[in-house]
Image (cartoon, rainbow, N blue to C red):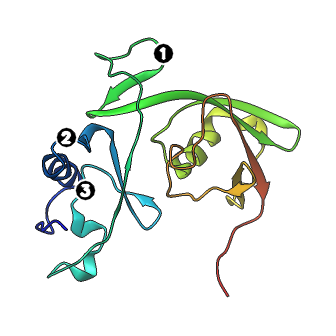
Amino acid sequence: ALELDASCTVARLKEMLQERTDGALPATKVSVFLDKAEMEDDKALVEFEPSSAEGMKMEVRVVVRQLPPSPACNNGNGAAKVNNKLQQRMSVEVKWGAKTATLEVSDMDAVKELRAELGSAAPHLLLPNDGAYFFIYKQNVMEEERTLRWHDVKTGDTIEIFNGRVTGGA
């Protein structure tokens, strides 16, 4: 267990994990998840659990990622540092019925960013104006707040679009 101030950032949490494990969990290769959402480095811990800032306890999951070699800026294989975060650029195919579009995206883009990019990058898909569609990847509904990396999307993969909305619950 680590004791941290609620205003501590996720990046600082990663640094403390690295210090506590004598480098066995390198901050640059660690992703931290709360429930199923990847926590962003620049956010304070309190932003993930604002209702319990005083004396809050948070249980997170730490995953060590195998990232491509660190580039100086862009190493020619699609990896680049943006805001000190290593991001892998990749090409994915988005399929809506018989129509397809190929998009260049980052593995750290959330699904909702893919949705936003589709409007301008692929107007020929003629998606519903009211946004009543959802994404499927490897037979699973993609969660809008999750990154493409979280969904394990790789370059060349196909993401399918289906008409309708996904609702949860009873």
| Residues under numbered marks 3 and 1 in contact, where contact means CB atoms less than 8 Å apart | no
Q: Which residue is mark 3?
A: 43
Label 3 crowd bin: few (<14), some (14–19), many (20+), radius 10 Å? some
- Image quarter where the N terminus lies is bottom left
| Place of residue 140 in the rendered image (x, y in percent of width and height, measured from the top left) | 70, 57
The answer for how far apart the CA atoms under marks 3 and 2 are is 23 Å
Q: Residue drawn 23% across and 77% down? A: 57
- Judge depth for marks 3 and 2 and give the one in front: 2
Q: Which residue is mark 2?
A: 23
Q: Amino acid at mark 3?
A: Lys
Of 135 and 13, the residue lying toward us:
13
Q: Amino acid at mark 2?
A: Gly
The answer for how far apart the CA atoms under marks 1 and 2 are is 27 Å
- Image quarter where the C terminus lies is bottom right
Q: Residue drawn 45% across and 41% down? A: 108
| Place of residue 54 in the rendered image (x, y in percent of width and height, measured from the top left) | 14, 82
Would residue 156 be found to the left or right of residue 163 on screen? Answer: left
Q: Please say if 28 is above or below 12.
A: above
Residue found farthest to the top = 76
Q: Residue drawn 33% across and 18% down? A: 71
Of 101 and 90, the residue lying toward us:
90
Q: Which residue is mark 1?
A: 77
